[in-house]
Amino acid sequence: MFSELKQLPADPILGLSVKFKADTNPSKIDLGAGIYKDALGNTPVLACVKTAEQFRVDNETSKAYLGSAGSADFNDRITALILGDHKVIAEKRIKTVSTPGGTGALRIAGEFIKKCTPGATIWVSNPTWANHKGVFEAAGLIVKTYPYYDYENKCLDFDAMLDALKQVSKDDAVLLHACCHNPSGMDLNQEQWQQVAEVTKQVGFMPVVDMAYQGFGTDLDSDAYGLRLMADTVEQMIICSSCSKNFGLYRERIGACSIIGRSAIAADIISSVLLSVVRVAYSMPPAHGAAIVETILGSQELTTQWHGELAEMRNRINDMRQLLVDKIAENGVERDFSFITTQNGMFSFLGIDEAQVQRLQDEYSIYIVGSSRISLAGISADNVDYLAQSIAKVL
Ligand code: LMR
């Protein structure tokens, strides 16, 4: 059976981390995977997480099964984090399950859509996170793209996006990034969200909102603006969220899939299908990350500490955006890179070609995704000069 297998290329993002680890160049820089690094290049465990973990060690009384939805307390708290005090919560129209990371949420969403409409199409932005296509295809969906980023002008191709969404079938699903678009860093403004929400309502397709970076754009509530507006505007939607980045819980694999139905009765039916999808996929989610998040969100003191730590991560990344633009200019590059400071979250496209990306890797040990997506979180005051000089050289 195995003799039929063919060697596959490494994952375009995770494969870079493997190469980076093996590189012995002391000047190497990792701008590949979206993982926060501090000014020293470390990804420390947040202090609020450490406290919550200690609480868990001291107070956990059982490792018995939790059931396919995971912890009810986590599910309630994460739903409130995402939606605030939105009416869909009081109306009991939303059902949330904990999932193994944001990727688990997306896969469960894909499987759920397939249960509703076998052979359904999901539209994703061009470009989108490199794993979206694979996750949805693995769930049995057809994946198509709508225009999103204008590579030439380094901005949103909004008119083309809206025109494309108007042509989508009402039986299809459309994936939207809530904030900090991965990979472009280019987000919809409030007026654009209003237009997208109106088109979603008029056409009747199913919005699937992916929120993997809540808190990394402006703040927790502002980053959820589009998602909450969508929940105001349409009767049914799917939300996939992640605690990997904003709680720094990457390897703990904790996220959530939330589905809004037309009524409380519809939500109960949705829940039964959602639980059956989880049961055959992985039975139930891991508990540790959820326990940490629910402890933090259940404590005023830890929540305040978390807000501070999240702001520190966000502000450091924004500082690095400006620093990189300044340093590239200092190195005599005439091309304008100021667009980087107008974008949000961990990523931006440098806008260099694949050969230049490869040269950065081969000659300077600087690791960037082939599309020229950089994770700004990998930049520090210590490596930015070398980075800017190297970019200037390959240009
Ligand atoms: C990324 O886009 O780099 C992160 O979401 C990590 C991943 O799993 O790809």
Image (cartoon, rainbow, N blue to C red):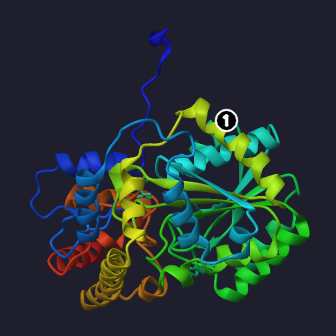
Packing grade of label 1 (10 A; few <14, some 14-19, many >=20) is: some
Please tell me which residue lies in front, 179 or 393.
179
- Indicate left or right for 159 with 330 as reference: right
Please tell me which residue lies in front, 374 or 333.
374
Q: Picture coordinates of residue 6 (x, y %)?
A: 46, 22
Q: Picture coordinates of residue 349 (x, y %)?
A: 46, 71
Quarter residue 366 falls in: bottom left
- Residue bearing mark 1: 276
Does residue 136 sit above or below 234 in this rendering? above
Does residue 383 sit above or below 203 in this rendering? below
| Residue at left offset 28%, top offset 70% | 48
Does residue 29 sit above or below 304 in this rendering? above
Q: Picture coordinates of residue 387 (x, y %)?
A: 23, 73
- Residue 38 visible: yes
Quarter residue 170 falls in: bottom right
| Residue at left offset 14%, top offset 77% | 382
Where does ligand 1 appear, by image quarter?
A: bottom left
Q: Amino acid at mark 1?
A: Ser
Please tell me which residue lies in front, 87 or 209.
87
| Residue at left offset 80%, top offset 67% | 164
- Indicate left or right for 178 with 303 as reference: right
Q: Picture coordinates of residue 380 (x, y %)?
A: 21, 77
The quarter of the rendered structure image containing the C terminus is: bottom left
Disc 1 is placed on an element classified as: helix
